[in-house]
Amino acid sequence: MIDPLVRDLDAETRRLRAAGPLVRVELLGVPAWSVVRHAEAKRLLTDSRLVKDIGRWRLWRTGAVTRAWPLIGMIDAGRSMFTVDGDEHRRLRAKTAQAVTPRRLENIRPLITNVVGELLDELSARDSHEPVDIKELFAQPLPMAVISALMGVPAELRPRLHALYKAFFSMLTPQEERLAVIAELDDIFLELVRARAAEPSGDLTSALIVTEEGGEPLTEQEVLGNLKAMVAAGHETTISLILNAVRALLAHPDQLRLVLAGDVGWDAAIEETLRWDTPISHLLMRFATADIEVGGEVIREGDGVVMSYRAIGRDDGHHGPDADEFRIDRTGTARHMTFGHGPHICPGGAGLSRMEAGIALPALFARFPLMRAAVPAEQVRNQPVLTQNDLREFPVLLHGA
């Protein structure tokens, strides 16, 4: 029911919602549960019987799943705040929260503005009558430049990092190659961690390493794990958010008019995009330490559980009967949980993604107010990435038809 090649995400979302709230699925031949409704997801994301420890997964304990499974790198990703629970999770998360402060994020705002301006200048210099891929030339380079600057990644490494993460997530990458990608990412970030340990600077990597008085330092492997995951999340999520917002607004000119006229704020457009077309389709994976009853089904001890955020965002039981509609003027108090809920809610990437989109989108539409999609909607395809809602490309005409 979950297509690893993402050939029709809308149809998949409808099937999951119709079968919910808890759906038995297969992930490249491996059985799991998919949670597809808001209320059940909210409850399970705070249920201490669901943990991130892969050692509690029956299929891993018995050897039915090994490192040969193509999705294993998204679950067994090394020790970090993303893979532990309880006191250890709180320790690792607290250190990250101390590093990813609102002040640190706010200090990067001028950089975001400058990068957006440079990218828009490059777009303006292109032939106005030819389609351009707004992903390749705008949505993709922006977040990599920003997250790299935040982490202290040298500029010359950014193209390689992007290529490595693209290969890591793609279902078309052979597993042997994917394992080599993981090893190279480890080498790149380990070199950065050791360089900053020897000579700290003002970047986030240094902040993760430097120990405040009375604090417990993170191990080298813990800093490495946090960095790898944060760059992946901060990069991929923001690409999808910007692209999905542009695509949704161009496909709904009535909604675009509202935001361009100032009748609805850009923050509302961003939040509706996050709900309606989530950057993450399916988040892997939690494991049951006891039997858990959900909607008449039972998650057995040792089962794996996936949060299907795109289906959760379209839940009409939570967002109303028009949940399938893109409405930036949506009223009511219902909130989405695209960045998670409970102890593992996104610690800093959510704020960074919102800030980047909040700068990039109004600047893009101010520069190109007549921008239009260059191909029909049905010709826009997703990347073959099971977990991410990422487009292969999105060609647009910057100055209209």
Image (tube, grey):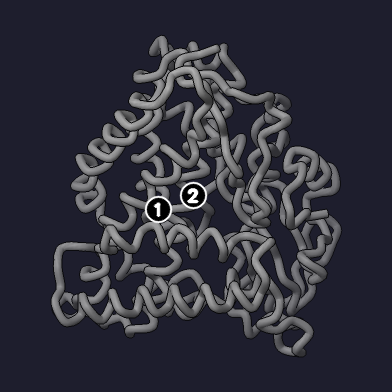
Q: Under tag 1, what secondary structure?
A: helix
Where does residue 78 sit, x and y in percent of width and height?
49, 79
Where does residue 72 sit, x and y in percent of width and height?
64, 74
User: What residue is disc 1 on?
Assistant: 349
Vertical position of residue 24 compared to residue 360: above or below: below
Question: Residue 313, located in which quarter of the rendered image?
Answer: top right
**Residue 271 visible to the viewer:** no
Residue type for callout 2: Thr
Q: Badge 2: few (under 14), some or many (20 or more) residues near its Cα, within 10 Å?
A: many
Where does residue 188 sit, x and y in percent of width and height?
37, 74
Vertical position of residue 352 compared to residue 272: above or below: below
In the image: residue 84, left or right of residue 118? right
Gap between marks 2 and 1 measured at Cα: 8 Å
Question: Residue 156, located in which quarter of the rendered image?
Answer: bottom left
Question: Residue 301, located in which quarter of the rendered image?
Answer: bottom right
Checking the image for residue 364, the label placed there is none
Q: Are marks 2 and 1 in contact (CB under 8 Å)?
A: yes
Residue extending furthest toward the bottom: 62
For the point 45% across and 58% down, the residue is 162
User: What residue is disc 2 on?
Assistant: 237
Q: Of discs 2 and 1, which sits in the foreground?
A: 2
In the image: residue 167, left or right of residue 193? right
Q: Under tag 2, what secondary structure?
A: helix
Image quadrant where one finds the C terminus: top right
In the image: residue 347, left or right of residue 60? left
For the point 54% across and 16% down, the residue is 255
Give the mark nearest the N terminus, 2 or 1: 2
Q: How many marks?
A: 2
